[in-house]
Each structure stands twice: as C-alpha cells, then as structure tokens.
Image (cartoon, grey):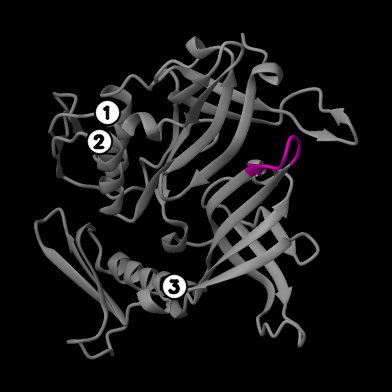
Amino acid sequence: MVDTKQHVQIDRIVGSVATGGWEVSFNFMNDQDAIVYSRQGWLDLMSEGGGVWEADFTNRIAGYMFPRGVVFDRRHSSSEAILATSHAFLEFAGAQGMLFEQADAPATRHEAANLTLGWIIHHIVNEHTNLADWVDLSGIDVVNSTSVNIYSVNETRSMWTTLQRIGSDEFHVPYFTKDDKLMYDVHPMLAYPPLPDTVLDMDDTMIIGQPEIIYRDIVRPDYVQLFALTDDGETIKSTYPDTVATGEQRRHREDHLRCNSQERLDILAVQLYLHLIRDYDLVVMLPGAFGLELELYERVSVTYTGTDRNGITVAWADKKWWIDTITVRRIHNFGAVTELKLQEEIEPAGYFYD
C-alpha cells in the first residue's frame, strides 16, 4: 500500500460528458515502478476543515493508471500519470463483430428472449471484457431500453466508441461514475418525467470568480428530423416543428435510430429540438473541491440576477441546468477550486408534461 500523503501530488480531477468518465491527473514521487500501464487503482479523498481531517474518506475515484512521463535527477523523480475510470480502458479495447437476435428459446450467447439495446450493452461489457469483476453494471437500463429483434455490432478498435454508438440509436448515454460504476440511461433532457430533484441549488453567495455565459446561436437548428427503423422493418419519421418550411433552413437530422412507436419518436423529436435550441451553456466556479460531491448529468439550479452596474439582464430564479463537465483544480500547495460547465434545461412544452 502506498502512503499517498507522501507520494502523490494531484493536479486536477475532471469528469466529462465528452469522454464519458473521470480522470485524475497526478504526479507520483520517487517510485517509477508504481505506475504500471492499466494497473487498477483508486484514490480515496478525505475532507479537511478547520485544520482537522475527517476520519474516513468521503469520495473514491476508481479506475486504471496510465503513465505519461517521468522527470528525474540523482535525488528525485516525478512520474506523471492519470487515473481514469474504465471508459479509458474501453477506448483502446477492440471487439469482433457480433449479431444479436431475439429468440423465445435462446440457444446462443447472442440471443435473448427480451432483447434490448441495454441488454446488448450489458452483454458486451460483461462477456467481452474483463471488467465484470471490477465494474458495477447495475446502472445499465436493460428493461426500459428499446427492444430490437435483430441488431448487428461491427468490428471495432474502440469498444467505448461502439457502446456510445449503440446508445445514440435510442438517445441513451453510457458513462462512468467516480467509483467506476457504468451507467446507461436515456439522456436526461429526453427522459420521461418526472425529472429528478436538483442535487445542488446555487446562488451568487456560493459562486466565486466570474460566471461565463456561452451563447449557442451558431449551432441552433430551425427544425429536427428523425428517422427510425422498427422491428417490423418499417421506417417511421418525425419532424419538429412541422410548420417550418424545409429547404435551406438549418436542419438537425438523425437517421440511424431504433424505435417501435411513432408516439415515442414524436416525443423524442420535441425533446431533442428543445435541447438543441437552448440559448446558452453556463460555466461557474465554486470554492473548494465541492465538485467531487457531484456526478455527470445531475440536475442543479442557479438563482442569479444581474445589476445595473454589471449590465447583465439575466434574472434566474431557481433556473435548472444539467452538469456537463466537472473540473477540480489544486490551488497552490493546499486547497482547490471547482469549475462546473452546465447545459441549460428548456422546459418541455404541451402534451409531453400533460
């Protein structure tokens, strides 16, 4: 066992929707051999307040070590490395092509009586990797995932890219929590209500530094068009808004989906449109390592009102957001600051909530 207080210096900790997991950038002092490629490990984090350390760790980040480089002289060495959740391991893991089929009496490993895309995700990780004894797979939505009667998975050099591609066929997202639990569920802005409660309610007394609003005008579409294949081999289509004249308007098109319900596809079109036309994303800073208490895709709120002096006209009262990126940076020799990148939540309209 390594005494981390003596040997490890953490630079930053990042959880990101873009990568689908968590990464810790750190330097390991005077022990090059401790950093072994793909070695399993974990980082236990304890809180301190008023000069007193908590008796036990409050957060654990688990995953695999990846060395980056070593700087040394006759007296000292510093090994740069990252500890990443299993998304990094799967990123470089290949897989052969597979064909999955629904069968009343399954006769092979790739047949299931209730075949869903979530079942396929679970099967690939459970039986085509060595992660089953390390990674918690209970967060994979198998039951409520889209049912399919046949589904093919192409040969790949990146199993993680393949899992993300499968998820995109039903607007589900795979990602890892800090403790390396694999989650697979519908994107929160496309989920059926009720939406989860907020895990953090922020106001201007909690936010430090300067919040940043990132406008999205350039990437906002005029309408969304979805095409999906049903188990019967039919193609169903949904366009929202359907009152926009097609042609040279900015269109967002998804033509690879699997869906067996026109009603569900119509709901997805509305929800995706509302998500894509959000006005802006937001970046805020919080004191300390508070980001380690949060997870990706969690729901938070912000209350903030601009002033005549700063010229900001926003008036947010308990406005809801979704966590996109969590970055915890070390400050000097002791202390930390948390940066949150948030996606604006647009309230669904009309029948979806009725």
Query: Could you tell me residue 140's position as x and y percent?
Result: 40, 38
Q: Residue at x 12, y 65 (%)?
A: 235
Q: Are marks 2 and 1 in contact (CB under 8 Å)?
A: yes
Q: Residue at x 27, y 89 (%)?
A: 244
Image height of 257 relative to 91, above or below: below
Can you tell which mark lies on residue 352?
3
Say which element carries label 3. Answer: helix
Q: Which residues lie in the magenta part?
A: 329-335
Q: Between marks 3 and 2, how big is the CA–CA gap?
A: 36 Å
Q: Give the amino acid type for the residue marked by disc 2 in the picture.
A: Ser
Q: Give the amino acid type for the residue marked by disc 1 in the picture.
A: Ala
Image height of 158 relative to 186, above or below: above
Q: Main secondary structure of the magenta part?
A: loop
Query: Could you tell me residue 193's position as x and y percent?
Result: 50, 62
Q: Quadrant of residue 86?
A: top left
Q: Quadrant of residue 228?
A: bottom left
* Residues packed near mark 1 inside 10 Å, few (<14), some (14 to 19) or many (20 plus): some
Query: Could you tell me residue 316's position as x and y percent?
Result: 67, 76
The residue at which mark 1 appears reads as 93
Can you tell which mark lies on residue 158?
2
